[in-house]
């Protein structure tokens, strides 16, 4: 059906039905309104980013084995 045919069909409806169509269109527009697409992400140079490896030289942290064990323990639990 072309736009002109849709308009013609719409105009042939009684005023009450036209009002319902207008309400339906408003509802659908609200339901299917999407947020603006995200802007393209900025390229980050992770190799030279100061955040990456920020704790590399910390002597007081010791072994990271405990962190790995904790993650494995917590992440392997099932939600029951």
Image (cartoon, rainbow, N blue to C red):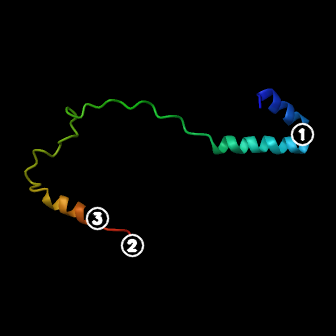
Q: Quadrant of residue 60?
A: bottom left
Q: Residues within 10 Å of mark 3 (few under 14, many from 20)?
A: few
Task: State which tag comes first along the sequence, 3 or 1.
Answer: 1
User: In the image, which disc is placed on residue 13?
Assistant: 1
Total marks shown come to 3
> On the rendered image, what quadrant is the N terminus found in?
top right
Residue at 85% across, 36% down: 10
Q: Quadrant of residue 48?
A: top left
Residue 32 falls left or right of residue 74 = right
> Does dot 3 land on a helix, a strand or a loop?
loop
> From the viewer's perspective, is residue 8 above or below residue 72?
above
Q: Residue furthest front?
A: 1
Give the distance between the C-alpha atoms of the residues marked 2 and 3, in whole angstroms.
12 Å
> From the viewer's perspective, is residue 42 above or below residue 17?
above
Give the residue pinned by disc 2: 80
Give the residue pinned by disc 3: 76
Give the distance between the C-alpha atoms of the residues marked 3 and 1, in whole angstroms.
61 Å
Residue at 77% across, 28% down: 3
Residue 32 falls left or right of residue 27 = left
């Amino acid at each position: 059906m072309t736009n002109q045919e849709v308009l013609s069909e719409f105009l042939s409806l009684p005023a009450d039905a036209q009002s319902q169509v207008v309400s339906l269109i408003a509802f659908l527009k609200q339901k299917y309104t999407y947020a603006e697409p995200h802007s393209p992400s900025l390229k980050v140079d992770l190799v030279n980013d100061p955040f990456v490896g920020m704790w590399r030289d910390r002597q007081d942290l010791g072994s990271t084995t405990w962190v790995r064990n904790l993650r494995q323990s917590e992440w392997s639990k099932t939600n029951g």
